[in-house]
Amino acid sequence: MDPHGPNLASEIDIGPQGSDTTTPLPTPAGHAGLRVRVRPEYLPARSDPHQPMHVFAYHVTLDYEASVDAPRVQVVDRHWRIIDASGGEDTVDGEGVVGLQPILVPGERFEYASYCPLRSRWGTMEGHYGVVTLDEHDRPTARHEAAIGRFYLVSS
């Protein structure tokens, strides 16, 4: 086994508008990072350009790339910055992701999908996840912000 965790990069195709960002997480065990990959997708069947309303799905993959003796981590909250084509900006803050606060062990992956409606034909999203490292009793020991790199929402 790779002492720095699995190399899962080849398994996810983020496409030309997606993002791939790794945030280092300092741990006593050495190397650790949370890799966040996002693949956006336009949903024409759920969109109505005459409203105007354009709906985009985004598929997120979180990989906890860490040595086997690194502590577990938990995604506790999220912050999104959404900008539409006219420069309008929205922020979204909330607990966890899709109603969960997943705990990841070194080498583990968590995936989910969500969506974002826009009034314009394109826009961007970016933000961060609030992540805590956990002790052996699942108590938080440190908080980090894991970056979600900017990705593009583009209708066809």
Image: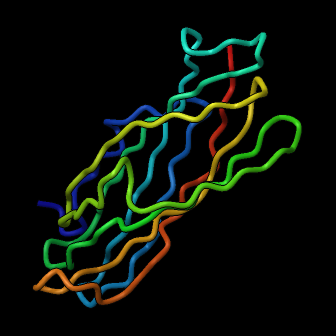
Whether residue 13 sits left or right of residue 107 in the image: it is right
Whether residue 72 sits left or right of residue 146 in the image: it is left
The one nearer the camera, 17 or 117, is 117
The one nearer the camera, 46 or 141, is 46
Asked if 152 appears above or below 35 in the picture, the reply is: above
Q: Position of residue 46 (x, y in %)?
A: 55, 15
Asked if 15 appears above or below 129 in the picture, the reply is: above
Report the residue that reaches farthest toward the right.
Answer: 86
Report the residue that reaches farthest toward the front.
Answer: 51
Q: Residue at the location (43% across, 31% down)?
A: 13
> How are the residues colored?
rainbow
- Image quadrant where one finds the C terminus: top right
Asked if 145 appears above or below 155 in the picture, the reply is: below
The one nearer the camera, 136 or 24, is 136
Q: Position of residue 61 (x, y in %)?
A: 37, 45
Q: Quadrant of residue 27?
A: bottom left
Q: Residue at the location (31% across, 55% down)?
A: 63
Whether residue 70 sits left or right of residue 43 in the image: it is left
Q: Residue at the location (18% across, 86% down)?
A: 135
Q: Position of residue 49 (x, y in %)?
A: 74, 12
Q: Residue at the location (25% across, 51% down)?
A: 109
Q: Position of residue 153 (x, y in %)?
A: 66, 32
Query: How many callouts does the rendering have?
Result: 0
- Image quadrant where one finds the N terminus: bottom left
